Image: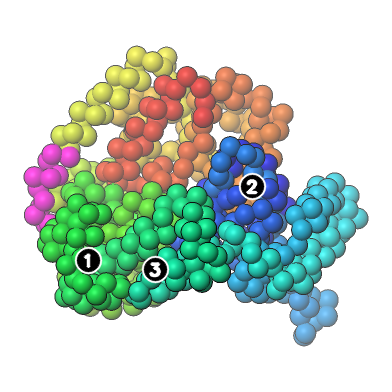
Amino acid sequence: MEYFHEIGLRLEQQLAVQHALIILLKGEIDLELEDRVIRISEGGAQVCLRGRTFGIKGYGSEPVAAAVFYFSFYQADPSRKDMLFEMKDTGAWMLREGIGTGMPVEKLQMFCRKTYKHFHHGRVFSQWRAQLDFQELLFELMEEGGRALKYDRVQVLEHVKTYIDEHYNEELTIDQLAEVAEFSPGYFADLFKKTYGCSVMDYVTEVRMNKAKQMMLGSGALLKEVAHLIGYKDEFYFSRKFKQKFGLSPSAYVKERRNKLALYGATSLLGYLTPLQIIPYAAPLHPKWSAELYHALGPEIPVHLDAYRQNYYKEANLNKLEEAQPERIICTSELELWEKKRLKQIAPLYELSLKTEDWRGELERLAEMLDRTAEAEQWLGCFERKMKRLHRLIAQHVNSPTLAVVRVFHNQLALHNSMAVHEVLCKILGCQMPALPEGEEDSPLSIGRLKKLEANHMLMLVRQDSETLAYWRKLSSSAEWLSLPAVKAGRVNQISSYPWREHSPAAIEQMAETAVALLTAKKSM
């Protein structure tokens, strides 16, 4: 169990190694569950099943208090009474579909305090007591879940948003949506805008327009058909709304974006297309593993392939590509032979290496194939000028920077001296990077060994899963960690997976910009 209490609470999307039960004890949050965002108010709760991702974003100037329980279900093995096996697919039934628990906040707080106290006590009997406390909490949630408060305002508004997402192709009015919420039209409209920062009809328009973009690029439907499919009877009214929102007409948008280029294998491939000003027809995207690209390009890409752990669901992605019928596929050269064979049956294949120092040459060759040589030359010219400027900034503001990039995963530390990181920090910015002896590059690091590396700056790449994050919170508050010179000097910064685990032109550019911003900042972030 973990407990958070802070103003502007922000947890980046993390992988739930076990089921996660998130309970909001104070304030209001947006809970990110995979690609969904759910607004939760005080007393609300939600389950994130194991193998999925969740993140938290707090609102307002008041503190947010949240408890997160990580748990698994076990059952006796019928064949052997002394053995247990894990029930991996259970958990969602606990709170049903509602996010209101129906339990008074004071009672929730009491359960959470009691469980937290026993769980962190350290004695075996106290751990056992925490198990019983948690089981009692689950029982109460299941008992009360069906009697959740009917007029929990945020829960009602979330229900209306779900209704809009599912009925965007129907005629929707404020009066009709207020009836769904069982509020008066005026009160409903004011409450929606106050809660989400936009009017309810603006939200309806946003949903419809994003659907329209995907339909126009993905189905080849006529403009009149698209207008009707998203809830507009008049195609000319739809065209005006579209141009008003995106700055160009639907026909101009389709003409500008007309390509059926697909990416397969890694989100890093997008970092080769964005410098060429190309948005693909299909690409792997995920709100955790490619958060920035997901939010920036997600609505513009008609076909989303699953990017869970770099193509974990390969067969499903291949089937989706087969259905999409792209004109060309760009993939990573590191794919297995059976994948390449299957891709060649779908469309002509272009292989691109993500493990080469010559990424400039890869970009130029890709640009030539896509008839985007001018765009590549322009981007590379701007890139070189920017890198020279960033190098001068480091030389002016940082004295002899020795920089260690440390990866935290599970309960271990290791140096993260990837090819891209070494190019950015050493070759471009002129920093020194400590290294372990040959053959030990990936060996686990103890705090003592990390101290001997004598790095005066450290960048921490913490894997975003519940197990690693729990270890990192414990380690970063330990006396041994706090004794490190870089920690005492306030020269430790946490960095994100993107761009620091990628190797692409766009990622290298962003890595350099981020490194300079962190190293020249007055205070550690």
Q: Where does residue 213 sit, x and y in percent of width and height?
A: 25, 64
Of circles 2 and 1, the one toward us is 1
Q: Where does residue 412 sit, x and y in percent of width and height?
A: 61, 44
Is 318 rendered above or below residue 504?
below
Tell me: 342 left or right of 460: left
Viewer can see residue 333: no
Estimate the spatial distance between the alpha carbons at disc 2 and disc 1, rounded to whole Å: 39 Å
In this view, the residue in front, 495 or 504, is 495
Q: Secondary structure at mark 1?
A: helix
Point out the tag, 1 or 3, that comes first from the N-terminus: 3
Please name the residue that numbered disc 2 is placed on. 27
Please state which amino acid type lies under the numbered disc 2. Answer: Gly
Quarter of the view holding residue 171: bottom left
Estimate the spatial distance between the alpha carbons at disc 1 and disc 3, rounded to whole Å: 16 Å
Residue 228 covered by magenta stretch: no
The image's colouring method is rainbow
Label ID, residue 173? 3
In this view, the residue in front, 67 or 154, is 154
| Neighbour tally class for label 3: few under 14, some 14-19, many 20 plus, Cα within 10 Å | few
Q: Secondary structure at mark 3?
A: loop
Label ID, residue 238? 1
Estimate the spatial distance between the alpha carbons at disc 2 and disc 3, rounded to whole Å: 30 Å
Please state which amino acid type lies under the numbered disc 1. Answer: Phe
Q: Which residues are magenta?
A: 368-379
Q: Which residue sits at x=65%, y=68%? A: 150
Point out the tag, 2 or 1, that comes first from the N-terminus: 2
